[in-house]
């Protein structure tokens, strides 16, 4: 006869993979650092990670490629293409718990192949490639173009270096002692959780309010509001379907009202009459910076835009 206690133990073990099963309501007793405990429990409540038991997280245990893919797909919110049927790789067993995550990863261009060793520990540089690719699928994030010196960069695969630089520039991860990334080291559960948590925070902090259509702008202008820091937001205006690259878009003025609104006025700029442009449909962008305390509205500058619109 199988006792209730034994059944519970079996259920806990079977759901200990990252992202598999329901989240536990218990605190992790083997995570001593308060900040780390709060972080992993936050991820647990969101269904991103699981403990290895009701109250154990096993922070130093390594994770597999399958677990990493499952966790990254869940954390970044990537979705399955509704028109997709079947499976991506014959190396993924039918009914495997990570099959959907692999299919989603492939559909979004993440660096997975049929040769991926799904059930073997993942290396730090391979996790970095997957995570960087997934984050970049969630938005077009502005970066300060600079190079961060990585002492052991020579130990990385060439295709890993850009991903590591992206994660460092976005502060999703940081270097270890001696400015090393340790690319060939296996990734622990805590290291994975820290990077995933930072990635989710990065996406949330830079969440783009993408407003298309005529509600505010009037000319199918895409409006993106990106948090620069706690004091400043960046407003990015993009105009698609321009007749050729000679046309552009510019912010003409910003009005700050007594109702804590910032009205950003823009115009479509005309091409240089002395230049020849290829006749290809193009898009153009411009940006402005607004204090974060202001609610942002965007309007066409009629004085500048009406005549131009008639020429488009």
Image: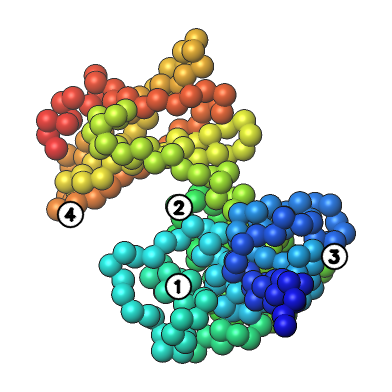
Foreground residue among 109 and 23? 23
Q: Position of residue 209 (x, y in %)?
A: 43, 39
- Taking the view exactly as shown, the residue that stands out farthest to the left is 310
Q: Earlier in the sequence, mark 4 or mark 1?
A: 1
Q: Earlier in the sequence, mark 2 or mark 3?
A: 3
Alpha carbons under labels 4 and 1: distance apart: 39 Å
Of badges 2 and 4, the one in the foreground is 2
Which quarter of the rendering shows the N terminus? bottom right
Please tell me whether mark 1 sits on a helix, a strand or a loop: helix
Mark 1 highlights which residue?
A: 100
From what the image shows, is residue 30 above or below residue 90? above
Q: Earlier in the sequence, mark 2 or mark 4?
A: 2
Mark 4 highlights which residue?
A: 280
Q: Earlier in the sequence, mark 3 or mark 4?
A: 3
Alpha carbons under labels 1 and 3: distance apart: 31 Å
Side of 62 where 244 appears, left or right = left
Alpha carbons under labels 3 and 4: distance apart: 60 Å
């Amino acid at each position: 006869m199988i006792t209730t206690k034994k059944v519970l133990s079996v259920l806990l073990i079977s759901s200990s993979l990252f992202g598999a099963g329901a989240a536990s309501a218990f605190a992790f007793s083997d995570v001593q650092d308060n900040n780390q405990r709060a972080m992993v429990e936050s991820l647990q409540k969101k269904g991103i990670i699981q403990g290895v038991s009701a109250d154990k997280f096993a922070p130093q245990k390594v994770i597999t490629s399958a677990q990493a893919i499952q966790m990254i797909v869940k954390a970044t919110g990537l979705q399955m293409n509704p028109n997709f049927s079947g499976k991506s790789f014959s190396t993924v067993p039918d009914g495997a718990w990570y099959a959907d995550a692999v299919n989603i990863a492939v559909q979004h261009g993440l660096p997975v192949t049929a040769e991926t060793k799904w059930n073997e520990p993942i290396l730090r540089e391979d996790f970095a490639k997957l995570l960087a690719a997934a984050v970049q699928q969630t938005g077009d994030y502005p970066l300060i173009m600079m190079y961060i010196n990585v002492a052991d960069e020579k130990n990385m695969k060439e295709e890993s270096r850009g991903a590591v630089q992206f994660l460092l520039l976005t502060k999703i991860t940081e270097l270890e002692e001696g400015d090393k990334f340790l690319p060939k080291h296996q990734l622990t559960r805590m290291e994975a959780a820290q990077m995933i948590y930072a990635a989710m925070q990065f996406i949330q902090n830079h969440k783009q309010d993408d407003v298309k259509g005529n509600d505010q702008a009037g000319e199918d202008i895409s409006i993106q509001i990106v948090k620069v820091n706690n004091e400043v937001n960046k407003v990015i205006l993009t105009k698609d379907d321009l007749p050729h690259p000679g046309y552009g878009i510019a912010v003409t003025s910003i009005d700050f009202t007594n109702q804590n609104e910032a009205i950003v006025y823009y115009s479509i700029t005309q091409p240089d009459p002395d230049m020849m442009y290829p006749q290809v449909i193009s898009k153009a962008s411009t940006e402005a910076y607004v204090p974060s305390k202001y609610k942002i509205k965007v309007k066409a500058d009629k004085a500048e835009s009406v005549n131009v619109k008639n020429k488009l």
